[in-house]
Amino acid sequence: MPNPTAAMLVIGDEILSGRTRDANMYFLAGELTKMGIDLKEVRVVSDDAPSITAAVKALSEAYDEVFTSGGIGPTHDDITADCIAAAFGRSIDVREDARDLLVSHWEARGTEVTEARLRMARIPEGAALIDNPVSIAPGFTLENVHVMAGVPAVFEAMVATVLPGLTGGKPLLSQSLRINRGEGEIAGPLRVLAQDFPDLSIGSYPFQRDGVYGATIVIRGSEGPQVDAAMARLAETFPA
Amino acid sequence: MPNPTAAMLVIGDEILSGRTRDANMYFLAGELTKMGIDLKEVRVVSDDAPSITAAVKALSEAYDEVFTSGGIGPTHDDITADCIAAAFGRSIDVREDARDLLVSHWEARGTEVTEARLRMARIPEGAALIDNPVSIAPGFTLENVHVMAGVPAVFEAMVATVLPGLTGGKPLLSQSLRINRGEGEIAGPLRVLAQDFPDLSIGSYPFQRDGVYGATIVIRGSEGPQVDAAMARLAETFPA
């Protein structure tokens, strides 16, 4: 059985303007790979309702799981929850369970309950809340879309809540070999190796360091003995 | 006149598997913002021909300029050039001008000319070469798509070659103010500010440092006096 597939949607003008360097994509990619869910596509779109809604629809139809990051705070540019509701034709309003979580958190801290703050309790009809141990305001899962905050500490905590509930696949195993020769010299034998092991993914990542050209060859697959066999052949072809 | 729009397509399993942290998106976003080209969308797809071709088509139709990163080396997993040719219905083969560049570079270094290495001279019919001062193998521009290497040093050098030839817009100006109050407190006045300055983009980026909650408010726009006026109002509303 093939592994489940996933996509990620990053929402935020701050990434597209170059103000902020995205960190969540790299984190999520690593976590999904560990549990055998294949991240197939990432899209970054701006804080623009039609763009968000269209991307959510397309990704939700094409992949098993979709993870979003960003746009669920209290300010006017936080429109993700409304866009997700629109994408699935659901109503959205402040929901009691999310409201209770937030209000009891605020009361314990003497924080005033404002209309703006309560925006964080807007949850689409039929969604399940995602626990946020860092700053309380919850994310949510609707259909196959998991909606999470953009602040890395919160995003990571929410991912840790969501992943154990998903069905993983065979974790991708990988081995790598650093070869101090130019890619042009490696490419021929590598192509033959890829043909002989069609179930494996064989990637070549060139580097150039202190005037030395080389490439790191990464062999990935879910069957350990196959990965071992391909790596043994590679090491034999290019002895250190 | 609105600014020109752009999209980026990052090609590479190594990003989606979490092995490598993408650096090119952040670099390109910053460069485009400086010259007034609005980066509207980024997609990351794997080294898979149908995925690359479909993404190139979609982005090329939707935006003024498209920048791709990755998949143009000599190895079997470098399929970007062929996919771009397919997306535009062009033929592709080793082209004389690209071949000459590479062969004279290799001859000067006593590097053997192999079939694998010559893959880097495969250029779609009708494309213009993009100079690569770092490692010679050229990128290319076909229609509105600029095809560049994934290795950051080479990607950056190619971007520096391409950008001066494009028509920019009004550079986006931005000012930011750090406010040490929770977003829930800032959100109400910020919404009013956004309504009063509909031509500006006003973003709120929450942070939490040493137990202090706050948000950096970024006001972006192409008209300096407008940005100044909005920032003055914001500073008045939230005195330090």
Image (spheres, coloured by chain):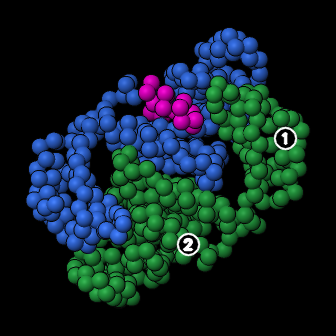
Chain colours: A green, B blue
Three-letter code for the amino acid on which mark 2 is drawn: Ala
Estimate the x, y position of residue A239 in percent, counting from the top left.
86, 35
Estimate the x, y position of residue A232 in percent, counting from the top left.
88, 45
Q: Is residue A28 magenta?
A: no
Three-letter code for the amino acid on which mark 1 is drawn: Leu
Estimate the x, y position of residue A4 in percent, counting from the top left.
66, 66
Which image quadrant for residue A203? top right
Crowd class of label 2 (few under 14; some 14 to 19; many from 20; radius 10 Å): some
User: At 77% across and 27% down in the image, what residue appears?
Assistant: A185
User: At 51% across and 24% down in the image, what residue appears?
Assistant: B130
Looking at the picture, tell me which residue is in the foreground, A43 or A148. A148
Which image quadrant for residue B194? bottom left
Residue A114 numbered mark, or none = none
Residue A234 numbered mark, or none = 1
Give the distance between the C-alpha atoms of the residues marked 2 and 1, in whole angstroms: 37 Å
Looking at the picture, tell me which residue is in the foreground, B48 or A129. A129
Estimate the x, y position of residue A132 in percent, counting from the top left.
45, 76
The total of numbered circles placed on residues is: 2
Q: Which residue is mark 2?
A: A160
Q: Assign a secondary structure to mark 1.
A: helix
User: At 45% across and 30% down in the image, what residue appears?
Assistant: B159
User: At 48% across and 46% down in the image, what residue appears?
Assistant: B58
Q: Chain of mark 1?
A: A
Looking at the picture, tell me which residue is in the foreground, B94 or B223. B223
Q: Chain of mark 2?
A: A
The residue stretch that appears in magenta:
B142-161
Q: Assign a secondary structure to mark 2.
A: helix
Q: Is A183 rendered above or below residue B77? A: above
Q: Is residue B151 magenta?
A: yes
Q: Quadrant of the N terminus of chain B?
A: top left
